[in-house]
Image (tube, rainbow, N blue to C red):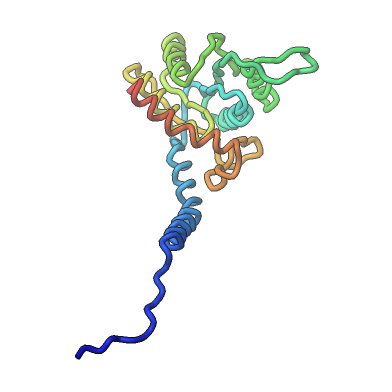
């Protein structure tokens, strides 16, 4: 005759608690990995050519980022990278200027920032034709290079914009004989406005600088590729 086993059966975890533990483990893993993932995502957007030399430094318009771009362009000019700085005009106005009693355009503010950094007015040229996108700037650069016989250009922009900017400039200027070099704003410097690759995700400006670049890259590849 079979004997019936006696003793208590181990309690089984409730399904709800088991799922909660799995979710908690996933959340912890993501929290641990996120800083590294964020750093890689930011660094992948930066394209920099070493030791650039060119006929002109072409500074892309950037509204609120104009300070870091123009100050870095002034540094490059002082180092002898090129003899001239060219600004594009996004046709946007900045804040109120009490001395001028108006809202100056960002291209005007950029030119003033260059002069404040010690760049002579004779070495600054602002293109009058308005541009509305990075692609527009590339088209304008090709026309400018053709008109002036420019054979090489250093493109200055903010760090996380540099991959899309370099790709667009090289795509539009392909076959023109103009060599395009990328010189995004350096990681260090008091004039830097966009956050570093390790900390961009801790600020609203960082999310505006990094996160939108990936869908924009896809859009540019699909439309202009």
Residue 9 or residue 169, whichever sits in front: 9
Residue 54 or residue 40, whichever sits in front: 40
Identity of the residue furthest to the front in this view: 1
Q: Residue at x 46, y 36 (%)?
A: 51
Q: Position of residue 66 (x, y in %)?
A: 61, 26
Quadrant, the C terminus: top left
Q: Position of residue 94 (x, y in %)?
A: 67, 19
Q: Position of residue 171 (x, y in %)?
A: 36, 22
For residue 3, which quarter of the picture? Answer: bottom left
**Is residue 162 placed above or below 59 in the rendered structure?**
below
**Is residue 80 placed above or below 38 in the rendered structure?**
above
For residue 113, which quarter of the picture? Answer: top right
Quadrant, the N terminus: bottom left
**Is residue 220 placed above or below 14 in the rendered structure?**
above
Q: Residue at x 56, y 15 (%)?
A: 89
Q: Residue at x 54, y 17 (%)?
A: 88
Q: In the image, 146: left or right of 57?
A: left
Q: Position of residue 196 (x, y in %)?
A: 56, 43
Q: In the image, 35: left or right of 106?
A: left
Q: Residue at x 48, y 26 (%)?
A: 155
Identity of the residue furthest to the left in this view: 1
Numbered disc total: 0
Residue 173 or residue 195, whichever sits in front: 195
């Amino acid at each position: 005759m079979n004997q019936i086993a006696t003793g208590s059966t181990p309690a089984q975890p409730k399904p709800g608690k088991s799922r909660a533990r799995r979710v908690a483990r996933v959340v912890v893993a993501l929290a641990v990995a996120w800083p590294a993932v964020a750093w890689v995502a930011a660094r992948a957007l930066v394209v920099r050519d070493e030791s650039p030399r060119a006929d002109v430094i072409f500074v892309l318009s950037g509204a609120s980022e104009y300070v870091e771009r123009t100050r870095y362009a002034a540094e490059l000019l002082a180092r002898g990278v090129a003899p001239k700085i060219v600004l594009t005009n996004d046709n946007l106005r900045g804040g109120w200027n009490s001395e001028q009693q108006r809202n100056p355009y960002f291209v005007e503010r950029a030119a003033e920032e260059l002069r404040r950094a010690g760049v002579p007015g004779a070495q600054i040229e602002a293109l009058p034709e308005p541009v509305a996108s990075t692609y527009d700037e590339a088209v304008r650069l090709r026309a400018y290079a053709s008109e002036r016989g420019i054979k090489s250009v250093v493109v200055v922009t903010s760090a996380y914009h540099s991959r899309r900017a370099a790709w667009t400039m090289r795509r539009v200027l392909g076959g023109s004989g103009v060599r395009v070099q990328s010189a995004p704003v350096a990681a260090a410097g008091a004039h830097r406005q966009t956050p570093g690759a390790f900390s961009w995700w801790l600020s609203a400006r960082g999310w505006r600088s990094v996160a939108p670049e990936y869908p924009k890259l896809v859009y540019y590849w699909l439309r202009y590729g």
